[in-house]
Image: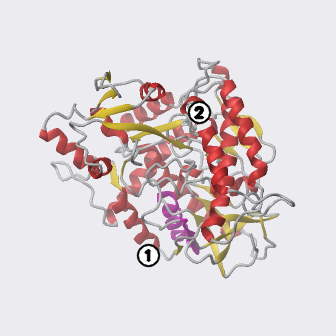
Amino acid sequence: MRDEAELRLQADVLVIGGGPAGAWAAWNAARAGARVVLAEKGYLGSSGATAPGGTNLLYLPPDAALREAAVQQRMEGGGQLSEARWIHRVLDQVYESLQLVEAWGYPFRRDEHGVPLRDHLQGPEYLKLMRKAVHRAGVRILDQSPALELLVDEHGVGGARGLSRLDGRRWEVRAGAVVIATGGCAFLSKGLGCNVLTGEGLLMAAETGAELSGMEFSRAYAPSAAFGTNTRGRTLGWASYYDQHGKVLHAGGPRSRDFLAKALLQGPVYAVLDKADTPEKRAILRRAHAIFFLPLERAGIDPFTQPFPLTLRYEGTLRGTGGLRLTSDDCATSVPGLYAAGDAATRERVCGGLSGGGAYNASWAICSGSWAGHGAALHALDAPRERRLRPAGGAGLRPVQGSAPIDSAALVAAVQSQVLPLEINYFRSEAGLRQALGAVDALWPEAGGLPDTRTPQAALRAREAAAMVAASRWIFNAALGRKETRASHTLAEYPELDPAQRHRLIVSGLERIALRTEPVPA
């Protein structure tokens, strides 16, 4: 990557990522008096996993009994890796922030008494409103401008460099603090809204020495029509399942977590929403999850009477709980000046080892974004003004001397061949994980090859490919390090929970990956 930049900006806080977490971080940093720049890979307001559909929220009134019950339920479901204090913090912050969202003009549904129901947000309306709020706060927004690397010196992180996807122009923002809100890594598995989530934020942070936590819990797959990308599968609770010969595999109602994965290993699986057996039920489903029906309607399928094929799409760290390790209440990472929010940050403190999807992820984005933005603004006030910053980027940007050109498409396909298969990453075994880790370890030197920089798209693809290789290595190292079955992590050789392993697994490094344990605070 050439080092000159056509656009140079100075800020107190740079937020990288424009989903809900990035928007809340930028708004809170600006409210704290910071000059803020937000750089988004796509378009703030329509990019990312939240934008295409609706999401639930952890909105509970300040009722001590209700909240304590919710906290204990999450502690148990997350394998006792959560922290009650952090869950209570989330409940408090969400309650406060959603009142702001309503004041900004979000049209929450109301009950029969006129009380707003703040437990659900429609993505398009929500993010459109957040863009307006961020703009009104005075934040400079760089759309279609993915960050590629961080800037560092002896004081820590002090900005970032990236490019415009539209014209290839290089940009540089120097800032007293940076918030990574780039989302998780879904490995280009074609989930709706997820193909911008390829892990560069994790890679950029790791290049500065940041640690990650909870990567072993990246085992989540979501159902989708085989010809579609929509992974909002709650509607499938009304379905019966069939094999390719029309034999009933499951006749609706509750089903085991492993049901669909096991069935797909045996052959094609089809679903029919035949449990929605009245016009009223069907109308309710269409109103509640309209986006679920779009690909089916385009294919000419009536899902209430006609079978449609299913698949499972890997959601990686997006619906896992792993990400950058947090060291303080304001979502600081282990590197000075660097903060993390949303799916780029570990959600273990709140979710433990169980999927952070749905209400928990959406609520965490609001809260962690708010805390990280405020913390970054305060840090920036004390940051040195004169700094000798240097770029920290490596793989996918600056080739190792004498290396061959990167074939980004082939590199991505090679990573996917180890990360996506159910038999490797869902039905985990030591032998399968070791084989997969060996394969992705062998890809890391290729990620350090000569990138194609003839177009901005090609330059970005090289960095994305390198980030996916790095993320896969962290995931497999951590998965092999947790020799038990806890929450969403399973290992065939260790089918029971081991009380002695009630700790977090911290991974770090790129050339050589280190693994250590960290106790869960009482």
**Relative vertical location of residue 254 with respect to residue 225 in this rendering, above or below:** above
Over which residues does the magenta segment extend? 20-41
Q: CA distance from mark 2 to mark 1?
A: 44 Å
For residue 32, what is the image quadrant? bottom right
**Relative vertical location of residue 67 with respect to residue 16 in this rendering, above or below:** above
Q: Which mark is residue 425?
A: 2
Query: At which x and y percent is residue 123?
Result: 37, 57
| Residue closest to the eye, 412 or 237 | 412
Amino acid under disc 2: Asn
Check residue 31 for magenta coloring: yes
| Residue closest to the eye, 127 or 238 | 238
- In percent of the image, x 83 and y 58: which residue is there? 403
Q: Which mark is residue 136?
A: 1
Query: At which x and y percent is residue 180?
Result: 61, 58
**Left or right of residue 387, residue 104 in this image:** left
Q: Name the image quarter holding the C terminus.
A: top right
- Determine the secondary structure under disc 1: helix
Amino acid under disc 1: Arg
Query: At which x and y percent is residue 9?
Result: 65, 79
**Left or right of residue 130, residue 518 in this image:** right
- In percent of the image, x 27 and y 60: which residue is there? 107
Q: Earlier in the sequence, mark 2 or mark 1?
A: 1
| Residue closest to the eye, 520 or 258 | 258
Residue 423 in sight: yes
For residue 235, what is the image quadrant? top left
**Left or right of residue 30, residue 270 in this image:** left
Mark 1 Cα shell of 10 Å, populated few (<14), some (14-19), many (≥20): few
